[in-house]
Image: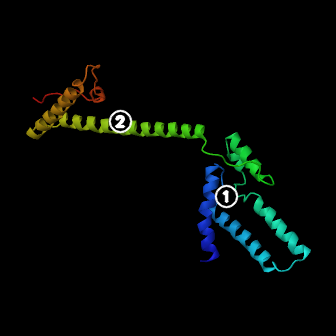
């Protein structure tokens, strides 16, 4: 496995942690470049590992300090792009030497907010789909009413009417609770018997 293959495999893992922290990142190809650069520095240190000169020892200590600090792949304008003050403070704390603080568990407030937002979006999508179906149904009924009456149109209208009556019967039957009405009754056009 080549160095490029390994860095391409590691990049999504790095990006996963930054996504969890909700910090904007640099492009994936730039992350790969940073990982390769770090690996090259390690390889250079490894070549002189048996030399115990002061320069080699100081380089090794500098590399250890570098590894203890944040592998920063944040976007250059990350602090201006982020809106949550807590996220900004977290990034600044992580950039300090020694990385003060750590990521905790799931942010329950944010998770609840995102759940509510996704439910709102789903309801809006269902509502718009229902409106489109209503528009399509009303236009097809209008076309049936305006077209010359034929036996197939009469049969179709009677089938649709029977379906509506069946829905009303199902809605009326039930326990001694209030009578539930179908939301479909509110938007359906009146049926006109063909003459």
Residue at which label 1 appears: 26
Q: If you read the primary sequence from the N terminus, does the residue marked by circle 2 or circle 1 appear first? A: 1
x 63%, y 73%: residue: 4
Q: Please indicate whether residue 142 sits to the left or right of residue 115 in the image.
A: left
As measured in the structure, the alpha-carbon distance from the residue carrying label 2 to the one carrying label 1 is 42 Å
Mark 2 and mark 1 in contact? Answer it, CB < 8 Å: no
Badge 2 density bin: few <14, some 14–19, many ≥20, Cα 10 Å? few
Badge 1 density bin: few <14, some 14–19, many ≥20, Cα 10 Å? some
As drawn, 154 above or below 76: above
Q: Where is residue 162 in the image (x, y as percent from the top left)?
A: 15, 32
**Closer to us: 181 or 109:** 109
Which mark lies nearer to you, 2 or 1? 1
Q: Please indicate whether residue 174 sits to the left or right of residue 12 in the image.
A: left
Give the image quarter of residue 52.
bottom right
Local secondary structure at mark 1: loop
Q: Which colour style is shown?
A: rainbow
x 21%, y 29%: residue: 170
Q: Please indicate whether residue 174 sits to the left or right of residue 14 in the image.
A: left
x 21%, y 30%: residue: 167
Q: Position of residue 191 (x, y in %)?
A: 19, 28
x 72%, y 46%: residue: 90
Residue at which label 2 appears: 131
Q: Please indicate whether residue 39 sits to the left or right of residue 157 in the image.
A: right
> Which disc number belongs to residue 54?
none
Give the image quarter of residue 164.
top left
Q: Where is residue 56 in the image (x, y as percent from the top left)?
A: 86, 74
What number of labels is visible?
2
Q: Quick one: quadrant of the C terminus?
A: top left
Q: Quick one: quadrant of the N terminus?
A: bottom right
């Amino acid at each position: 496995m080549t160095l490029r293959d390994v860095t391409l495999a590691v990049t999504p893992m790095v990006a996963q942690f930054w996504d969890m922290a909700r910090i904007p990142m640099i492009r994936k190809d730039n992350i790969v470049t940073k990982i390769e650069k770090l690996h090259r520095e390690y390889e250079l240190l490894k070549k002189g590992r048996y030399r115990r000169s002061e320069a080699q020892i100081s380089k090794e200590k500098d590399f250890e300090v570098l590894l203890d600090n944040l592998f920063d792949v944040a976007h250059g304008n990350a602090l201006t792009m982020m809106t949550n003050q807590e996220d900004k403070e977290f990034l600044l704390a992580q950039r300090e030497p020694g990385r003060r603080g750590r990521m905790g568990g799931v942010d329950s407030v944010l998770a609840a907010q995102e759940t509510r937002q996704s439910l709102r979006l789903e309801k809006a999508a269902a509502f718009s789909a229902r409106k489109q179906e209503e528009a399509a149904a009303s236009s097809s009924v209008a076309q049936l009413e305006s077209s010359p009456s034929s036996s197939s149109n009469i049969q179709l209208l009677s089938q649709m009417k029977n379906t509506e009556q069946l829905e009303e019967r199902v809605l009326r039957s039930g326990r001694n609770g209030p009578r539930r009405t179908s939301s479909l009754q509110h938007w359906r056009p009146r049926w006109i018997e063909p003459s």
